[in-house]
Image (spheres, rainbow, N blue to C red):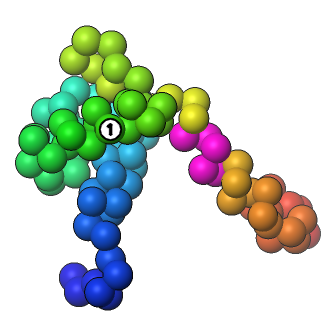
Amino acid sequence: MSHGRHFVRSVARAMAVLRAFDGDRPELTLSQAAKATELDRATVRRLLLTLTELGYVTRRGRVFRLAPRTMELGRAYLAGLSTLERPDHQS
């Protein structure tokens, strides 16, 4: 896939790590996150530790989990939508 010259690969990788968590996988080990994202373990480790430091991921031993702070991203998006654009709006 070709990206523009302003594309920041590390941001894309961090987003891939965040998206690896879901309803079926609310908790991931480093190995599981690396497999889910198809990124190498060293990269995933640095990303998970950074996301932990920023408050978007929590860690308990070898297990990582999304933190409530990730909801800020969705809340910011929803706050910017008009009533008609909101997914829960019934026509």
Q: Is residue 72 magenta?
A: yes
Q: Is residue 33 magenta?
A: no
In percent of the image, x 41 and y 24: which residue is there?
58
Is 87 above or below relative to 33? Answer: below
Q: Quadrant of residue 20?
A: top left
What kind of residue is marked 1?
Thr
Q: Quadrant of residue 79?
A: bottom right
Q: Position of residue 32 (x, y in %)?
A: 19, 35
Asked if residue 40 can be seen in this view, the reply is yes
> Which residue was labeled with disc 1?
50
Q: For the magenta stretch, what is the residue range?
A: 70-74
Q: How many marks?
A: 1
In percent of the image, x 29 and y 86: which residue is there?
5
Is 81 above or below relative to 70? Answer: below
Q: Nearer the viewer, residue 22 or 34?
A: 34
Q: Secondary structure at mark 1?
A: helix
Asked if residue 24 can be seen in this view, the reply is no
Is 21 above or below relative to 83? Answer: above
Is 47 above or below relative to 85? Answer: above
59 with respect to 83 (left or right): left
Task: State the quadrant of the C terminus.
Answer: bottom right
For the stretch drawn in magenta, the main secondary structure is helix
Task: State the quadrant of the N terminus.
Answer: bottom left
